[in-house]
Image (tube, rainbow, N blue to C red):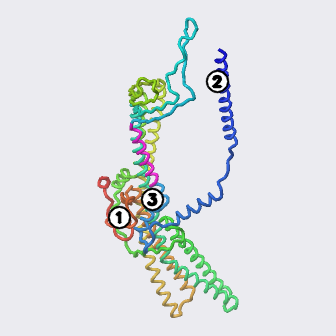
Amino acid sequence: MISTRILLGARLRALQTVVRLALSVTTALMLAGCLIRPHPIDNEDIRARAVKDFFAISSIEEPISGPIDLYEAVARALKYNLDAKVKTMQAQLAHQQLNVANYTLLPQVSANAGFDGRNNFSGGVGRSLVTGRQAVEPFTSSEKNVTSGNLALSWDVLDFGLSFVRAQQAADNVMIAEEEKRRIAVRLVQEVRSAYWRAVSAERVLQRVQFLDESVGKALDSAQRIVDQKLQAPLTPLNYRRDLLNTQREVRRLFRELSTAKTQLASMMGLPPGTPFDLVMPPRRASVPAMNLDSQKMEEQALLLRPELRTIDYQRRINAKEARAVFLELFPSLKLSFGGYYNSNSFLLYQNWLTYAAQVSWNLLSVFRTPAKLKAIEAHGHVLDAQSLALTLSILTEVHVGATQFVQAKQEYQDAWNYHETQSAIVEQTKNLWLARRTNDLTLIRERVNDVVADVRLDAARSGMETAYATLMASLGEDAVPASMNAQNLAQLTESLRKLWEPSGFPMSDAERRPVAHAKAVAQ
């Protein structure tokens, strides 16, 4: 009896020691957690990030090998523009999330292994409920060290149904990401098209603008000498100087507007700032081919192909599947399991065995949550319907506005062409008069400035017409890029864009445009 008390006292002291140690460790961890303070990122880490990002944007994956035409400019923008890359990565992320959702359809297979050990045998005794005396001697049914393992398969039928619905929703999210990528690609083509023609205008006239600025500077010096030496009445050279200053202001405004055009185009193409490159100079043309702007056909095409409306269609389908998931949650959960087990305990009669089970569970409170969820889904459906109607009206308005702007842009280009031809003739006549000394330097400089302005206006009108056309095509939802562009290198994508646009009749560079296709033909 005494030895038993001593043994029990030793075990109690050991248990108290373990409890004190656990409390000490827990207290230390809590104190350490309370002492955590926010701290800024190290300057070296910031510097490393800045250097890494700088080299990332400074590297050119496919170097420039020659003058860049509009097709290559669009191809580089589609492949290397950072905004377009973000949308492409988001589409890839949606595909990966769909893969993850597909894996959730599989049953769960778990493999477990373990080891359990102690310094003495686990054992016990029995006591009579009648007499209160010990009934049996102390005994054990387990070894000191035991290893175990199992391989079990389980499948929840309700979880499978819900996972199937979630996977379908993930597939719809993939299509939404693809539509968003298509919308960004169309917008990027529109912006590059406009920027390219501004850069072409800058290439054509910047040298002339700089030369005119120098000429105006020399004429101002000459006018100032006349004023200083009083060779003429003061009012005449001052008026002359005022006209020159107005001319100089116009010249420098043109230089300011055009000097950044190539830099903006380089940014859209994903080129590092300061990268030198040349542009292909497309020829000018006097007329623009006519387009068949059938309002009804354009409206039908826009309502069928616009990515914004397609996105709402996919969102409606996701919302409908959410209602199906709510109904599935009403059913009880049926879980099936099957597994094989092993235990090294020699006291067991069977150390290897198989188990199989079925379990049904039902959350009765889900019945009360279902009406609220269905009302929320119905409200979301009403919101999508309202968004669809608002977008439909907006898109139809965009189609008509785009068609009107394109017609006006064509007329403006024709007017700019006529103005340019007239101004060129005036410059030629003024130059002849100046050579014959029948007019002064100011008149010649002014007409040369007007000639440069006419050039810029002509290129600006061409850029506006190209932008208006790209805007019209974007409002119709027409694809501006090939579907397989991700699998192509730069040269292949450039050639694909050329094949896509040249037969259309109104290419990116110079040709004629076919009538707008009927919506049903485009959809096929």
Q: Which residues are magenta?
A: 88-106
Q: Is residue 511 at all visible to an observer of this figure?
A: yes
Q: Separation of disc 1 and disc 3 at Cα?
A: 18 Å
- Per the picture, the main secondary structure of the magenta-coloured stretch is helix
Q: Nearer the viewer, residue 32 or 269?
A: 32
Q: Residues within 10 Å of mark 1 (few under 14, many from 20)?
A: some
Q: Position of residue 312 (x, y in %)?
A: 42, 45
What amino acid type should be assigned to the residue bearing mark 2?
Arg
Residue 217's place in the image compared with 491, above or below, is below
Per the model, the C-alpha gap separating discs 1 and 2 is 83 Å
| Residue 11: mark in rendering | 2
In the image, residue 297 lies at what x, y percent?
A: 33, 55
Image quadrant in which you'd find residue 1: top right
The residue that label 1 is drawn on is 496
Q: Tag on residue 187?
A: 3
Q: Secondary structure at mark 2?
A: helix
The type of residue carrying mark 1 is Ser
Q: Position of residue 390 (x, y in %)?
A: 45, 47
- The mark tally for this picture is 3
- The one of 510 and 516 positioned closer to us in this rendering: 510
Say which of marks 1 and 2 sits in front. 2
Q: Is residue 80 above or below residue 38?
A: below
Q: Kindly identify the amino acid type of the residue bearing the numbered disc 3.
A: Arg
Q: Is residue 317 visible?
A: no
**Between disc 2 and disc 3, whose residue precedes?**
2
